[in-house]
């Protein structure tokens, strides 16, 4: 985006999501860039540009959230849709370098481009840039990627930075020796917050819902929808917020036996519980 004149003295532009100004008489395009002078803050041009910057921020967050949903759910996405979205910088930032899988067993790689012709360019595990023309692709949840360790090493070599966390997303696999007839996990129970409302705020800031004394997250796994739920008690009866056990449900079935929980639902439920546990206040003497 170029510079916009504001009166005869200044020009304004968007840089890294914020409005900056420069002298209109400055020949260098960036030499005198600075924060907005006080006299410009209420100018209509500045207000409109700030609103546009806020819209761009919301749009980028919405794009990332949608791509994250495709990835967590491992949903098939039409390749043609990706080619239409790719020119948009927000969509491109969210999609670029995600591991995609086409329709053949060897059609795996880091997405680098989606061309108007309908072809996708990916870097495969041999380091070669190849073109794919699948009808749909998936962006698998990392717990479903058999070569995850190799992909992480290769990504480091390529300098890959994903806009949506995929290959470096924290994952959990169900232990082989777990009691499959049990219906709860207590590994992340007992995290104490200053109040129930602090714990609730932590949950909502992470994108989870709070209802009925539970923090919940919905996960699509193998064509089914699971709900992971962490018990956080009742704000009217519990002075302090404290995490309880983690359980999973499916439609009207709750709680499920642990042996009936899918791999993605397990991983994402544990990720939610771990994030709530990690956000607890830690006393200075305990941290030392």
Image (cartoon, rainbow, N blue to C red):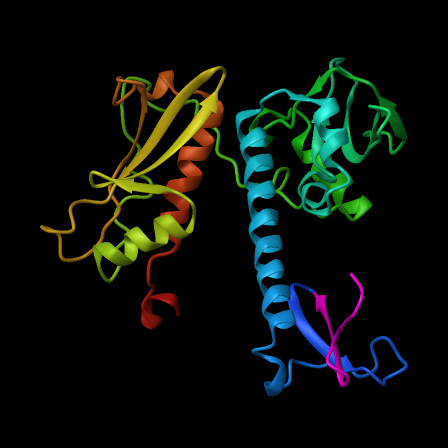
Q: Quarter of the image containing the C terminus? A: bottom left
Provide residue 188's location: percent of width, then percent of height.
33, 43
Residue 213 in the figure: left or right of residue 281: left
Provide residue 240's location: percent of width, then percent of height.
18, 57
Residue 8 in the figure: left or right of residue 61: right
Q: Is residue 16 visible?
A: yes
Residue 40 in which image quadrant: bottom right
Residue 8 on the magenta segment: yes
Residue 269 in which image quadrant: top left
Provide residue 45's location: percent of width, then percent of height.
65, 70
Q: Is residue 2 above or below residue 256?
A: below
Q: Is residue 150 visible?
A: no
Q: Quarter of the image containing the N terminus? A: bottom right
- Magenta stretch, overall SS: strand
Provide residue 62's location: percent of width, then percent of height.
56, 43
Q: Residue furthest left?
A: 237
User: Residue drawn 23% across and 45% down?
Assistant: 232
Q: Is residue 86 above or below residue 134?
A: below
Q: Is residue 119 above or below residue 229?
A: above
Residue 231 in which image quadrant: top left
Q: What stretch of residues is rendered in magenta?
A: 1-15
Residue 217 in the figure: left or right of residue 69: left
Residue 253 on the magenta segment: no
Give the camera-side residue of 7 and 129.
7
User: Residue drawn 60% across and 71% down?
Assistant: 44
């Amino acid at each position: 985006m170029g510079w916009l004149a504001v009166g005869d003295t200044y020009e304004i532009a968007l840089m890294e999501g914020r409005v900056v100004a420069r002298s209109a008489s400055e020949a260098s395009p960036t030499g005198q860039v600075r924060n907005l002078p006080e006299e410009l803050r209420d100018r209509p041009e500045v207000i409109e540009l700030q609103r546009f910057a806020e819209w761009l921020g919301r749009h980028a967050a919405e794009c990332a959230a949608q791509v994250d949903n495709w990835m967590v759910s491992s949903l098939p996405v039409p390749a043609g849709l990706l080619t239409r979205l790719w020119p948009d910088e927000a969509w491109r930032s969210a999609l670029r370098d995600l591991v995609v899988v086409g329709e053949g067993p060897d059609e795996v790689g880091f997405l680098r481009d989606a061309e108007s012709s309908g072809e996708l360019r990916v870097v495969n595990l041999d380091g070669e840039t190849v073109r794919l023309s699948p009808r749909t692709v998936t962006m698998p949840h990392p717990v479903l990627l058999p070569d995850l360790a190799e992909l992480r090493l290769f990504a480091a070599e390529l300098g890959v930075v994903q806009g949506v966390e995929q290959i470096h997303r924290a994952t959990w696999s169900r232990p082989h020796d777990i009691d499959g007839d049990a219906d709860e996990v207590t590994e992340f129970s007992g995290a104490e917050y200053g109040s129930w409302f602090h714990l609730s705020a932590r949950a909502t800031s992470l994108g989870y819902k709070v209802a009925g004394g539970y923090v919940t997250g919905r996960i699509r796994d193998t064509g089914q929808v699971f709900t992971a739920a962490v018990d956080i008690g009742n704000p009217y009866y519990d002075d302090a917020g404290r995490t309880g056990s983690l359980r999973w449900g499916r439609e009207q079935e709750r709680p499920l036996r642990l042996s009936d929980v899918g791999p993605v639902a397990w991983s994402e439920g544990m990720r939610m519980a771990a994030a709530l546990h990690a956000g607890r206040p830690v006393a200075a003497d305990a941290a030392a």
